[in-house]
């Protein structure tokens, strides 16, 4: 019998000619029995680093995965590629689960996906013991491993119990995989789940994603314009902080002709599942969701991720935006943020039941996210430096394409701080942003008259700025901890110790002023547009949709868009020529080859 190699599995099963980055090194290390911590951005090819060793090693590979949807997607894709795969989760009946367990004991499966809470249960531990003593366990792959860290952005207590795998099956190699983990989180993953692992850290750069962060003015209208002008008929994800906002934005998009679906934890399980299936299986759907949606979503053709509210950390932002452009084609990460975002996130931290250390860490992470949003330099440089990676300016983010000017706002800041101080001193209590700005702009409101603030020396000294400009400045001062918003007492504004340095002229304040320029499409974007205008490519997409419906799988499980584009460009005339196209393995060649050749023979 000829022993299979990683290279032959890559080509024959998955249809790719070459490995990416350090995939081959990880596969070799794990295949030889070593533990590995793998940090690789979403869409970077983490799955192959455990799928191929599981097929090369003796026994069954076990993948710990936190979401049912991810398991089902992965198993569908693997089955289409000819890999013996299954999952064990709550969606199976008792009889179905028992059948999978029999297949595991009989060595009839290469990979089995199991949820962490199920895996640590007594029944599953007995099953793993039986398999280990019988056909053998090839490896354990722990996906989304950052969930083990109590300091991480997505802590899940059940992940901490996975140490049982290391303690009980110490001769079975383990991989811990994640797309986002800072240095303390990496150390915790290695300590709690692995033994003497090799650490593989890929570049965090996603060059196909363009990052844009804009001031929040009319966020829903801004979002609608963005989708209509740049992503009509594209699949995308819109993240909102509140469940009610999710429902309202999804309804707005639908009323405006954008096929949108809501997803949040307040919906019943059946509705969430139906909406997720529609998003995965249909082209051009937009999912409006809270962060409850998305971990492990393996949909490669998501062309944009939009945030209507600012995430609480760069880790969360990076993970969520990383769900765009997994097919390596151009995609957008678009976000609006304003003062309310800063106030809301700080309020959530202060009101949490966490200890002081966790609150301090959360505040530091939020400040880093604010720094990214307020930055006037390259967004990509900022993002990568957060993860310890140096980079040159990308030339593709909003700040690189339309560099903002820096405006000295020190004098305006002193006016604002003085107005906050004088209003409070005069009345004996503080006031919120709207009233302070009304006083600065000299507006004769009922509230101004009630407290006699038209008599203050700061009344009307800020008429040179609009209300929006004062709010922008206030947001910056809050972000820099020069002003605090007291959410416990009606969001009144309070000065901090840092205010004194500004009032005394010892600290200057600069604001970014974005110059709007016409949007320029990159070469990749122009290539993608021309490809989608290709009649043969469109015909192949129609064919793929029909095949996907017949097989009951999402369209991307049949073929990615990149594979269809290559077919449209090469127009192969034989199975041999089809075999050379990236993404066509032997199983898919046998399943779809003749049908593709027949379609190509007729032409568009």
Image (cartoon, grey):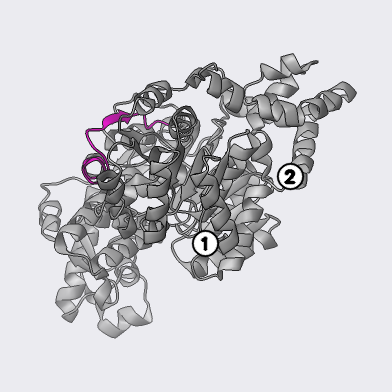
Residue under pointer 1: 90
- Quarter of the N terminus within the rendering: top right
Of the numbered discs 1 and 2, the one sitting upstream in the chain is: 1
* Viewer-side label of 1, 2: 1
Residue that protrudes farthest toward the right in the picture: 602
Which residue, as the protein is rendered here, is positioned at the far front?
A: 134
- Asked whether the viewer can see residue 440, the reply is no
Residue closer to the observer: 235 or 74: 74
Q: Secondary structure at mark 2?
A: helix
Of 456 and 150, which appears nearest the observer?
Answer: 150
The residue lying at 24 percent from left, 60 percent from top is 416
Name the disc covering residue 551, or none: 2
Left or right: 551, with 433 as reference point: right
- Crowdedness near tag 2: few (<14), some (14–19) or many (≥20) residues, C-alpha within 10 Å: some
Whole-percent x, y for residue 399 in the image: 41, 35
* Left/right of residue 335 with respect to residue 258 in the rendered view: left
Q: Which residues are magenta?
A: 186-205
Q: What is the C-alpha distance between the residues marked 1 and 2?
A: 23 Å
Percent of width and height locating residue 9: 54, 23
């Amino acid at each position: 019998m000829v022993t299979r190699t990683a290279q032959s599995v890559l080509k024959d099963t998955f249809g790719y000619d070459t490995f990416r980055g350090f995939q081959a090194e990880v596969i070799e290390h794990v295949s030889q029995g070593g533990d590995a911590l793998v940090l690789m951005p979403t869409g970077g090819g983490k799955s192959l680093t455990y799928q191929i060793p599981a097929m090369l090693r003796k026994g069954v590979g076990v993948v710990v995965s936190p979401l049912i949807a991810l398991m089902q997607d992965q198993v569908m894709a693997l089955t289409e590629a000819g890999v013996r795969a299954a999952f064990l989760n709550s969606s199976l009946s008792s009889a179905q689960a028992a059948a999978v367990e029999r297949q595991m004991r009989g060595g009839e499966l290469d990979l089995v996906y199991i949820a962490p809470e199920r895996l640590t249960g007594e029944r599953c531990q007995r099953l793993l013991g039986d398999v280990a003593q019988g056909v053998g366990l090839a490896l354990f792959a722990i996906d989304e491993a950052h969930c083990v860290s109590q300091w991480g952005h997505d802590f899940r207590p059940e992940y901490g119990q996975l140490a049982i795998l290391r303690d009980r099956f110490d001769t079975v190699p383990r991989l811990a995989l994640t797309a986002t983990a800072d240095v303390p989180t990496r150390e915790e993953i290695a300590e709690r789940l692995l033994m003497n692992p090799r650490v593989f850290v890929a570049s965090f750069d996603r060059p196909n994603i363009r990052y844009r962060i804009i001031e929040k003015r009319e966020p829903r209208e801004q979002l609608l314009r963005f989708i209509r002008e740049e992503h009509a008929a594209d699949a995308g994800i819109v993240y909102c902080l509140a469940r009610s906002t999710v429902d309202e934005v999804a309804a707005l998009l639908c009323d405006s002709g954008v096929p949108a679906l809501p997803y949040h934890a307040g919906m019943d399980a059946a509705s969430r599942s139906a909406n997720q299936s529609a998003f995965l299986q249909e082209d051009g759907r937009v999912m409006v969701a809270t962060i409850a949606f998305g971990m492990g979503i393996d949909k490669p053709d998501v062309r944009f991720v939009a945030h209507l509210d600012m995430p609480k950390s760069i880790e969360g932002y990076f993970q969520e935006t990383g769900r765009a452009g997994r097919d390596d084609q151009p995609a957008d990460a678009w976000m609006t943020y304003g003062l309310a975002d800063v106030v809301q996130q700080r309020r959530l931290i202060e009101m949490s039941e966490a200890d002081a250390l966790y609150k301090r860490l959360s505040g530091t992470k939020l400040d880093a996210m604010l720094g990214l949003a307020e930055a006037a330099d390259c967004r990509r440089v900022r993002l990568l430096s957060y993860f310890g990676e140096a980079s040159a300016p990308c030339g593709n983010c909003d700040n690189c394409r339309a560099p903002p000017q820096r405006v000295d706002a020190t004098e305006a800041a002193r006016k604002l701080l003085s107005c906050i101080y004088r209003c409070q001193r005069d009345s004996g209590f503080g006031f919120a942003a709207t009233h302070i700005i009304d006083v600065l702009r000299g507006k004769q409101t009922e509230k101004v008259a009630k407290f006699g603030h038209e008599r203050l020396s700061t009344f009307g000294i800020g008429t040179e700025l609009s209300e929006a400009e004062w709010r922008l400045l206030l947001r910056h001062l809050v972000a820099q901890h020069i002003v605090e918003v007291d959410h416990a007492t009606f969001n009144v504004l309070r000065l901090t110790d840092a205010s004194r340095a500004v009032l005394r002229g010892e600290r200057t304040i600069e604001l970014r002023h974005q110059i709007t320029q016409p949007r320029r499409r990159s070469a990749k974007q122009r290539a993608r547009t021309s490809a989608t205008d290709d009649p043969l490519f469109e015909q192949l997409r129609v064919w793929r949709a029909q095949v996907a419906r017949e097989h009951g799988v999402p369209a991307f499980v049949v073929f990615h868009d990149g594979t269809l584009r290559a077919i449209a460009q090469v127009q192969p005339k034989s199975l041999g020529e089809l075999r050379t196209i990236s993404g066509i393995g032997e199983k898919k060649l046998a399943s779809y080859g003749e049908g593709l050749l027949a379609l190509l023979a007729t032409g568009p």
